[in-house]
Amino acid sequence: GVVRVLAISGSVRAGSVNSAILRAGAALAGAEVKLELWDGLKAVEPFSEDDEAAPGAGVKALLAAIAEADALLIATPEYNGSVPGQLKNALDWASRPYGRSVLVGKTASVIGASPSGFGAKWAQADLRKILGACGAEVVGEELCVAQAHTVLGEDGLPTDEELRTALTTLVATLVEAARAAKAA
Ligand code: FNR
């Protein structure tokens, strides 16, 4: 059957290279994959334990989107050597209640894109650690998209064959793992 992948960009700006990479990933995904780019990150309220009993609309939308998805594909920018606060905030919400949250056992893959030469390497490492701490199953290799503002063509797809293959492979690996988890 169809595998539903929730794609989350750690950047909420309109011209985000991370969002653009996720759109490319969606275009390269197989026919049996429903990969949707989530646009609700900006609306997720700041985390507070005081609000956990009655979370806001932004949080509810986040939890529902993750719960409905078979897998998560997160593309993160790097802010000051780590993940952006808005992404960490969303993951903190999604991690609750600890050990029984929508993230436990969720198959996930990580991409990082930056205009620099490093491709958000540190942010990806931190994101993998955070997802692991939340009980998600991180699969696939690190994918550092460096000089990310130059890598996509007019059609929104990677112009470079190597990146195109790496992105296609990462999405396929994620989908395969999610399919296996579903069957188990
Ligand atoms: C950055 N940027 C950045 N880049 C990087 O490679 N390492 C870093 O530590 C940082 N730190 C950082 C902090 C803050 C507050 C901002 C706003 C930016 C640059 C960053 O990679 C660039 O803005 C990307 O284009 C952000 O990704 P999106 O929004 O294009 O997806």
Image (cartoon, rainbow, N blue to C red):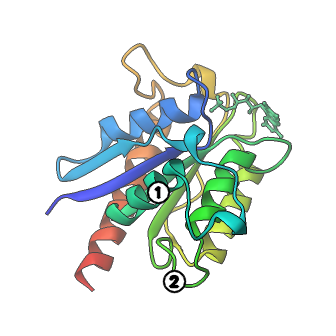
Percent across and percent down for residue 71 are 39, 62
- Residue type, numbered disc 1: Lys
At horizontal 60% and vertical 33% (from top left) the residue drawn is 12
Instruction: Specify the quarter for ligand 1.
Output: top right
Residue that label 2 marks:
100
- Residue type, numbered disc 2: Arg
The reply to whether residue 145 is visible in this rendering is yes
Label 1: few (<14), some (14–19) or many (≥20) C-alpha neighbours in 10 Å: some
At horizontal 61% and vertical 55% (from top left) the residue drawn is 90
The residue at label 1 has a CB less than 8 Å from ligand 1: no
Q: Is residue 121 left or right of residue 12?
A: right
- Of 10 and 159, nearer the camera is 10
Residue that label 1 marks:
60
Label 2: few (<14), some (14–19) or many (≥20) C-alpha neighbours in 10 Å: few
Q: Is residue 151 left or right of residue 82?
A: left
Residue occupying the far top of the picture = 154
To which quarter of the image does residue 77 belong?
top right
Mark nearer the N terminus (2 vs 1): 1
